Amino acid sequence: MADREYSRYQKKVIQRFYDNREQNDEQRLSEMIADLFLANDKKKAKLWEQAEEIMKRLGVPEARLAHVLKQKDPTVLASVVEDIRAGHIKPPKKEKPATPKAE
């Protein structure tokens, strides 16, 4: 990717995105439950791939992740969301992304 200069405003937008990513991921995962109930088979496959990525970012243990993906049941995914909200599943420690410098 080419070197790019970001304005101060753009840097703040990028920073807020990463600061709130955990909450956004949790919200998206809970919305996926309804989408999975209503989706056709082709769309379900894509939604399960997205759910896997989000659960990895949220720190869902590998064994639980494998179980959810094996079952491919939205109610099992709902129990994961409940555990995340209850604090039983803790997200990994945040690493601050490198903020681009404006010159």
Image: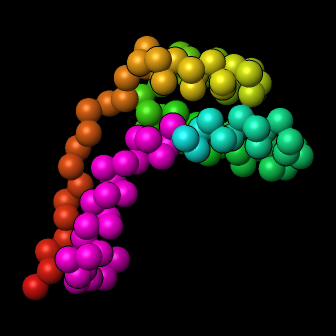
Asked if 59 appears above or below 29 in the picture, the reply is above
Which quadrant would residue 99 be assigned to in this image? bottom left
- Percent position (x, y) of residue 87? 41, 18
Position of residue 85 in the picture relative to residue 30 (left or right): left
- Name the residue at the left extreme: 103
Horizontal side, residue 9 vs residue 26: left or right: left
Residue 3 in sight here: no
Q: Residue furthest right?
A: 40
54 in relation to 88, above or below = below
Residue 102 appears in the rendering? yes
Q: Where the N terminus falls, by quadrant? A: bottom left
Image coords of residue 68 (percent x, y) = 65, 22
Residue 95 shown in magenta: no
- Which residue appears at 19% of the width and 60% of the height? 98
Q: Residue at x 52, y 17 (%)?
A: 83
Residue at 43% of width from left, 14% of height from top? 88
Question: Chief secondary structure of the magenta span?
Answer: helix
Residue depicted at 23% across the width and 81% down the height: 7
Quarter of the picture containing the C terminus is: bottom left
Report the span colored magenta.
Answer: 1-26
Is 4 part of what is drawn in magenta?
yes
Q: Which percent across, then down, holds residue 57?
A: 43, 38
Q: As drawn, is 58 to the left or to the right of 78?
A: left
Colour style of the rendered protein structure: rainbow
Residue 95 place in picture, x, y as percent? 23, 43
